[in-house]
Image (cartoon, grey):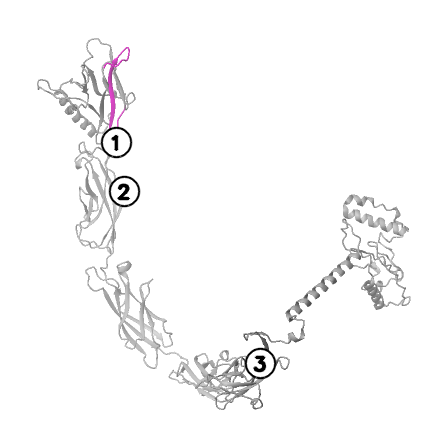
Amino acid sequence: MPKRSEEMLMDLWMSLLLVWITSVPCVSMTPIIGQSKSTLTGGSAAVASGLGEGQRLLSRAKRGWVWNQMFVLEEFSGPDPILVGRLHTDLDVGGRNIKYVLAGEGAGTIFAINELTGDIHAMKRLDREEKAEYTLTAQVVNADTDEPLEPPSEFIIKVQDINDNPPQFIEGPYRASVPEMSAVGTPVTRVTATDADDPVYGNSAKLVYSILEGQPYFSVDPNSATIKIALHGMDREMREEYLVVIQAKDMGGHMGGLSGTTTVTVTLTDINDNPPKFSKSLYDFVIPEDLPIGTMGGKVKANDRDIGENAKSTYNVIEGDEQGVFEIVTDTQTQEGILRLKKPLNFETKRAYTLKVEATNIRSEPSGGLPYKDTATVKVVVEDSDEPPVFAKPMYSLEVNENAPINTVIGTVTARDPDSSGSVVRYFIDRHTDLERQFNINVDDGKITLAKTLDRETDMWHNITVTATEVRNHSQISRAIVAIRVMDINDNAPEFATEYEAFLCENGKPGQVRKEVIQTVSAVDKDDPIQGHYFDYRLVPEMLNNPNFTIKNNQDNSISVLAKHDTFRRQKQEMYFLPIIVTDNGNPPMSSTNTLTIRVCGCSKDGIVQSCNVEAYVLPIGLSMGALIAILACIILLLVIVVLFVTLRRHKNEPLIIKDDEDVRENIIRYDDEGGGEEDTEAFDIATLQNPDGINGYLPRKDIKPDLQFMPRAGQHSGPNGVDVDEFINVRLHEADNDPTAPPYDSIQIYGYEGRGSIAGSLSSLETASSDSDQNYDYLREWGPRFRRLGELYSVGESDRET
């Protein structure tokens, strides 16, 4: 045990001894329960408590205490168990046979009692932080019969704390931040330490805080543990981070107390306390005059020692740019000022600029004043460049009448070379914008002329691109858009808006048709006159006095067609044609003749058109044309079904091959042609196609049974040495076309002709000189259904040959 702990224990023992000397050794515990009395005598740490409940002392002749608790020091260790206290009863007199019994928390394991004397000992080291008190029950019983002699009494053994736990910072280490340049005494953060010792008893848990590292920048409050700024003018740009060590010591900070430490990392946060500063006071840039608008011409940079938003600046041109040629923007990534063009430069007009550029912080200074600023001078020298020609206008709008003659001048475009040399300019049309080559341009003066006649009704606008280039430098090209509008002339005659077809009732009542409108007609014109359209309608001269129809002007560029009588009959005339002349108001006027078709129809009593054909007279029995078409369709469908049925029956009655479920033969084409061997010094002799020995023979088909007996062909010879190949092939082709048993069916084609003069003779096992009768094909049956069928075919061939 540490030395300071031993000293504390000695002090505690002395104080307890003094209390024990001044106390009455035996007092009654439970005077209200029975006639006998039992007492508790504290041992090493007995402390008097208050009077028991219900007990009243009537005289001061005898002082006594009611003992209901005992104390034991924690972490006490020695060679023998420590005496906690002693139990005593009034019954323990003389030689009475009694014993003491202990029960409750820790009885028998942590605490043991001497049955004869009532002494209670602690058998183990106790830790108050694990368990602060134990509740037990004591009782006096007969030593022989274990019969209780007194009611049980409950008491408490409390573990008395010693300073054996140092303070701990559970949440450490800490991180904190504070703005730079903060005033002295500004709180930074607060730390908290805990002590597991008893905060009620003594000063074991009374903590005092101090700073071990971090002076003179920070201080700590000894009681609240609040860390504060202790130094004025702490600048982040000089030092950003500090490490502070805080100590917590118990026992009120006195000697012998335990302590614990933690670290606090304090970071100074930035404030806008530094202005931007240009790296140079003068910048020089050389910018070509043909630099495109919006392109960077140079960069400037104002540095700021602050960070984050406090270091961001904006740039502006405050002097030297009265025409607004330049602008300067901020690069958000690098915080540089990018000098760009807002308007094109012209070397011939102005060759140099002197600009004053200002950098301004986005955020204001901490005191609430104006933002920090800095300025620099920028000199821009314009460099001469070979510029392309410049058109007088970026876009031209021209007009031309439709149907104007070829080579008509539409308009002129002009361009000039802006360079001081003033080169000659040539003009061209970009043919990608004039694919039909409807326009031409004079390369010298820019006059645009017609190459083809134009029709406004086809295209009202033509947009072409004209290019201008210098004679000495063809790479310098400028472009201008030319919009050509085709003006309208009256070159289209009006016509009916649609193909009108009017209907007229034949069985109208008197007055039902006469003078009633049977059709309203309007006209359209492809032309587009400025004053609008006005159409004049009239009948052709030969129809002016017709007895059937007339027209009436509706005063809205339309007319109404009227019937003059109500005696129209389809038997007399089913259809009428009424030619009408339509004339526009153009200069010169254009007209056209349009024909209105009028049908005479059958109508209901209410005048509703029902039928406009002559079918009622063609079909007097009352059948309509739709019904007749349906009947004809049914008849045609029945005929088709009958033809298909007959065709299927015909194919079914004429089988071409033998039906067999196991007929799995494939097309086998056998070639027995043999080459000439070593004597063959020429290419293939086509004369071998002619078989003089077998030309008159006929090899019957062995795989099918033909319905018709095919007659063998008559022999044809072209001479002993002559070869008529054409005749030979034609004969074979004719036989194949007329042979009903010819392929495409599963078949075996046998070519037995080996050629004349063959020393080896035939290699075919089917056509050898030896008899096949000695061949036995029964073994093929064991090879499966395919070879079994092959064996049957060979067997059939043998039987046919014998027959």
Q: Amino acid at mark 1?
A: Glu
How far is mark 2 from mark 3, CA to CA? 105 Å
- Decide which of tag 1 and tag 2 comes sooner along the chain: 1
Where does the image place residue 126, in percent across and percent down from the top left? 26, 26
Instruction: Determine the residue located farthest toward the top in the rendered image.
Output: 95
Left/right of residue 663 with respect to residue 624 in the rendered view: right
Q: How many marks?
A: 3
Q: In what quadrant of the picture does the N terminus appear? A: top left
Q: Quadrant of residue 475?
A: bottom left
Q: Residue at x 85, y 48 (%)?
A: 795
- Mark 1 touching mark 2, by CB under 8 A? no
The one nearer the camera, 122 or 47, is 47
Q: Residues within 10 Å of mark 3 (few under 14, many from 20)?
A: some
Q: Quadrant of residue 637?
A: bottom right
Q: Residues within 10 Å of mark 1 (few under 14, many from 20)?
A: some
Determine whether 230 is above or below 367 in the image: above
- For label 1, the residue is 129
Range of the magenta residues? 124-149
Where does the image place residue 107, in percent across and percent down from the top left? 28, 21
Left/right of residue 63 with respect to residue 503 in the rendered view: left
Q: Is residue 136 magenta?
A: yes
Where does the image place residue 344, in percent across and percent down from the top left? 35, 77
Q: Quadrant of residue 287?
A: bottom left
Q: Amino acid at mark 3?
A: Ile
Of circles 2 and 3, which is in front?
Answer: 3
- For label 2, the residue is 171
- For label 3, the residue is 598
- Decide which of tag 1 and tag 3 comes sooner along the chain: 1
Determine whether 269 is above or below 569 in the image: above
Identify the secondary structure beneath mark 1.
loop
- Mark 1 touching mark 3, by CB under 8 A? no
